[in-house]
């Protein structure tokens, strides 16, 4: 989790009042109904480095209750750990997460038994001194992918680079936790890409079968796009054909 998310869901009351409730949820002492009420109670949340927000502004899309319970169960373990751990080593960094945010996280952790924090910066599979993915990492990713899916992905990328030039393909990556409850905006995006004949790869790990079947019927074109349940993300991000990454993941 990012430090902002961790402070929101597990930090002090001024960061959102969810931490104690999630720790109680982990211990079986709080109900999902209580978490639902707290999530959108109309309280103002003050997180470091960003403007104050109402708690309901963190919920731009309503999720099914079963999915929320699954997410809360995972986050409750992190909230519990925030109080139990003897210290923290993270992959956060000042340039990305901001000094203000990390300082507040450090102060909160230190306020509980004087525990230390160490921020090492991003642990990315790049070659030393560069921004290219190491060949060993790309090879390991390929071995972990279904061969037909990997080959189809790379074939589209290579063809687009040859026919359209550099930086001409969009990669659309939906999160692995859930699929949006409404597909209206996605339909608008794919319709625009189709009209402009812009090539893209769409990764849809959690898309319901009926929805992806409809999307394929409406938009799939082997010359311009590839729909895949799981994509070789490092290989895509390192390819010269890639122009833009669109993702539902949130900070």
Image (cartoon, rainbow, N blue to C red):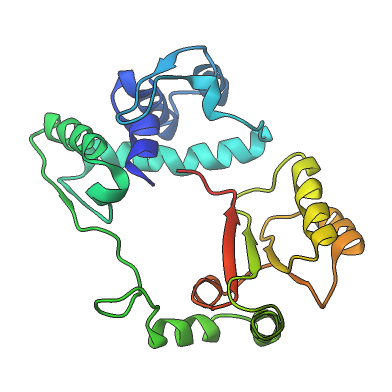
- Side of 184 where 115 appears, left or right: left
The C terminus: image quadrant: top left
Name the spot of residue 157 as percent of width and height, x first.
65, 80
- Side of 146 where 184 appears, left or right: right
Q: Nearer the viewer, residue 237 or 232?
A: 237
Q: Nearer the viewer, residue 38 or 148?
A: 148
User: Count the marks: how many?
Assistant: 0
204 vs 73: above or below: below
- From this viewpoint, which residue is outermost toward the top? 42
Q: Nearer the viewer, residue 139 or 185?
A: 185
- From this viewpoint, which residue is outermost toward the left? 114
Res 33 quadrant in image: top right
* Residue name at image x 58 percent, y 53 percent: 247
Query: Is residue 118 visible in this depiction of the protein?
Result: yes
Query: Is residue 176 visible in this depiction of the protein?
Result: no
152 vs 245: above or below: below
Name the spot of residue 90 as percent of width and height, x first.
25, 53
Q: Nearer the viewer, residue 136 or 66?
A: 136
Res 83 quadrant in image: top left
Name the spot of residue 242 as percent of width and height, x first.
58, 71
- Side of 25 where 210 appears, left or right: right
Name the spot of residue 23 as percent of width and height, x first.
37, 31
* Residue name at image x 32 percent, y 41 percent: 3
* Residue name at image x 58 percent, y 29 percent: 59
């Amino acid at each position: 989790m990012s430090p902002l998310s961790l402070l929101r869901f597990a930090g002090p009351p001024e960061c959102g009042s969810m931490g104690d409730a999630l720790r109680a949820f982990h211990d079986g002492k709080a109900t999902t109904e209580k978490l639902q009420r707290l999530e959108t109670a109309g309280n103002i949340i003050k997180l470091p480095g960003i403007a104050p927000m109402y708690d309901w502004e963190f919920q731009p899309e309503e999720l099914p209750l079963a999915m929320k319970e699954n997410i809360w169960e995972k986050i409750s373990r992190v909230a519990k750990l925030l109080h139990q751990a003897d210290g923290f080593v993270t992959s956060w960094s000042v340039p990305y997460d901001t000094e203000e945010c990390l300082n507040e996280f450090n102060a909160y952790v230190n306020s509980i038994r004087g525990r230390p924090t160490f921020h090492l910066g991003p642990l990315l599979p790049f070659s030393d001194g560069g921004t290219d993915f190491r060949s060993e990492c790309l090879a390991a990713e390929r071995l972990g992918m279904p061969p037909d899916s990997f080959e189809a992905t790379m074939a589209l990328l290579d063809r687009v680079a040859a026919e359209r030039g550099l930086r001409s393909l969009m990669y659309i990556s939906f999160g692995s936790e859930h699929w949006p409850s409404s597909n209206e905006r996605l339909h608008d995006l794919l319709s625009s890409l189709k009209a402009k004949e812009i090539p893209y790869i769409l990764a849809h790990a959690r898309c319901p079968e009926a929805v992806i079947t409809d999307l394929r019927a409406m938009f799939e074109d082997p010359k311009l796009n590839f729909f895949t349940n799981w994509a070789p993300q490092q290989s895509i991000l390192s390819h010269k054909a890639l122009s833009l990454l669109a993702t539902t993941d949130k900070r």
